[in-house]
Image: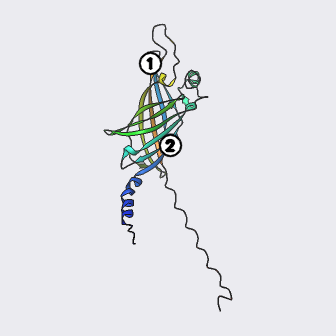
Amino acid sequence: MKLSLKPVVAAVVLAAPSFAFAADFDIDTAHSGAQFSVKHLMVSNVRGAFSKVTGKASIDEKDITKSTVEATIDTNSLNTNEPKRDEHLRGPDFFDTAKYPTITFKSSKVEKAGENLKVTGDLTLHGVTKPVVLNVEGFTTESKDPWGNTKRGGTATTKINRKDFGLSWNAALETGGVAVGEEVSITLDLEMNKKQAPAPAAAAPAKPAPAKTAKDTK
């Protein structure tokens, strides 16, 4: 009985594009960052940043909704340009970086939103995990830097209530209101490097033919 390989070959050919259009990227920590803004004393906004952001993304060019992204923020990289305030924010009243050294985000859904994207995922902050939606703008196509690295990037924004994540410290003001607002605006500026495809494994050297013996020549 003959077995036809045509259906198998056809299935492989049809499935190939789904693999060919997916590309893996690593977040470029040196050119990425996370910023936040919160109301202070009911009259102004205080801004801060985390300088160490790592992570990865898988971008599906054929169907962007199949893409995924994961990011990790080092909470000890916090900076608000005021050392005493930074010390307070790193302490138990706020981020408690000794106990919770990272903030993480892992996507669960990617949707198109006009020319932009909406990325839903789990945000873990201060030991609490909640779903959030990132609005992603300026998601670029691939480009190469002067050193031959393939790059992509974008800016993601969202807003959270810090009390939902257990960051509830506050102080009442004599004039009414509180010292620190509850709503926090978050911005992620990400630049990513495309992973290089692994080099094909070198072919094993051919085994030398066995030497002929005197018996073989008879």
Q: Quadrant of the C terminus?
A: bottom right
Position of residue 79 in the picture relative to residue 158 (left or right): right
Give the amino acid type for the residue marked by disc 2 in the picture: Asp
How far from the left and from the top, in percent, is residue 124?
50, 32
Q: Nearer the viewer, residue 67 or 128?
A: 128
Please give the label number shown on residue 44.
1
- Find numbered disc 1 in the image and state the secondary structure of the residue it sits on: strand
Question: Within 10 angstroms of label 1, few (less than 14), some, or many (20 or more) residues?
Answer: few
Give the residue furthest to the front.
1
Q: Nearer the viewer, residue 123 or 51?
A: 123
Give the amino acid type for the residue marked by disc 1 in the picture: Ser
How far from the left and from the top, in percent, is residue 69?
45, 41
Give the residue furthest to the bottom.
218
Seen at 60% across and 28% down, the residue is: 99
Please give the label number shown on residue 217.
none
How far from the left and from the top, in percent, is residue 110?
39, 40
Q: Nearer the viewer, residue 92 or 187?
A: 92
Seen at 44% across and 18% down, the residue is: 44
Seen at 38% across and 55% down, the residue is: 17
Mark 2 → mark 1, Cα distance in angstroms: 32 Å
Q: Quadrant of residue 20?
A: bottom left
Give the residue pinned by disc 2: 28
Figure coloring = rainbow
Q: Reading the chain from its start, which is encountered first: label 2 or label 1?
A: 2
How far from the left and from the top, in percent, is residue 34?
48, 33
